[in-house]
Amino acid sequence: MDNERYTCITLRNDRSTLAEDVRQGLTAPNKWLPCKYFYDPEGDALFVQISGLPEYYLTRVETAILNRYAVRIIECCPSNLTLVELGSGDSTKSRYLIEPCLTRQQELTYYAVDISPTGLENGTRQLLQDYPRLRVVGVAAEFEDGLRYLAGAGDSRPRLIVFLGSTIGNFTEEEVAQFFTMLRGHLRPTDRLLLGVDLIKDPAVLEAAYDDAQGITAKFNLNILTRLNRELSAHFDLAAFRHRAVWNDERNRIEMRLVSVRDQRVKIAELALDIEFRQDETIHTENCHKYSKDHMESLLTDHGFQVLGSFSDSQERFCLFLAS
């Protein structure tokens, strides 16, 4: 990798560790695990497979919207931009924004913020080869830590903060409010926000997207237990759990869980814990909230953003919001 054009910074987050989160989540009356722990190298690879599945429309539709509207989106932003992507993953969709930026400016700095260092390196390697006028800074961190780093980086150019993939859907209502408040604290008047949001649709379509026929999403969900086995010396038998993804109509969200297929006790050696599971007891691993366009626009407005435009596909399955 071109070391002159690539820098990677790893920020340690002392506020939250895997061990603390697992202890808190698996000793709760209703067991849960944070979905951010899906993304180890195996999880990254599985999510790339998920993105290409026929049932998983999200990546396909969002990419098509970017392909159609990226030039217009960049035209709505100040010139001489810096591009910042939160949850950059493999940075595939960033290309659609990088290209119109480089059409109108001589060079571009792209900050890729992601919790997975492996994903950062894999995603940015090809970008550097394809765009000689691109500089990449990988920031291995959680979102707020990454934005705090950028605030002290001394880059005074206008920024386009990109948050794609409907990752906002993983947040609770309280977390959405905290996230928007945090963003407002870090954004400047010349900055812009581009937010990808999955829209409410037929529950059958939604459930299929999170429980595909090939079982890749099931492997992705179960991989979090593999990670606990490896990193916390846990003794989860993956065959003793199954994947479940169902639509909660009252909360407008898909709920992903791991279901214990029998009564069992699981030892987590690093935490000196024995966790009991009853048959059919679940571990809640992820929420995927879906929104109406009006609801998301109201949320943005209520938190001090001005929506400059929204860009959707013809069937209104997904929407990109551009805000200042």
Image: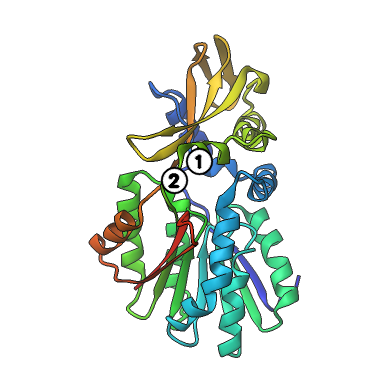
Mark 1 element type: helix
Image quarter for residue 211? top right
Identify residue for label 1. 206
Q: CA distance from mark 1 to mark 2?
A: 7 Å
Q: Which residue ends up furthest to the left in the rendered image?
A: 302
Q: Amino acid at mark 2?
A: Lys
Image quarter for residue 197? bottom left
Instruction: Please indicate, yes or no, whether residue 15 appears anywhere in the rendered image.
Output: no
Residue at the image position 43 percent from the left and 81 percent from the top: 77
Residue at the image position 46 percent from the left and 48 percent from the top: 14
Confirm or deny contact between disc 1 and disc 2 (CB under 8 A).
yes
Identify residue for label 2. 201
Residue at the image position 63 percent from the left and 17 percent from the top: 240
The relative height of residue 35 versus residue 238 in the rendered view (above or below) is below
Front position in the image: 14 or 235: 235
Mark 2 element type: loop
The relative height of residue 142 versus residue 282 in the rendered view (above or below) is below
Instruction: Please indicate, yes or no, whether residue 106 appears anywhere in the rendered image.
Output: yes
The N terminus appears in which quarter of the rendering? bottom right
Front position in the image: 287 or 181: 287
Q: Is residue 277 left or right of residue 91?
A: left
Ranked by sequence position, the earlier of labels 1 and 2 is 2
Front position in the image: 315 or 124: 315
Asked which colour scheme the image uses, the reply is rainbow
Tell me where residue 269 appears, x and y as whole percent.
60, 23
Tell me where residue 274 appears, x and y as whole percent.
53, 16
Q: Amino acid at mark 1?
A: Leu
The relative height of residue 242 versus residue 52 in the rendered view (above or below) is above
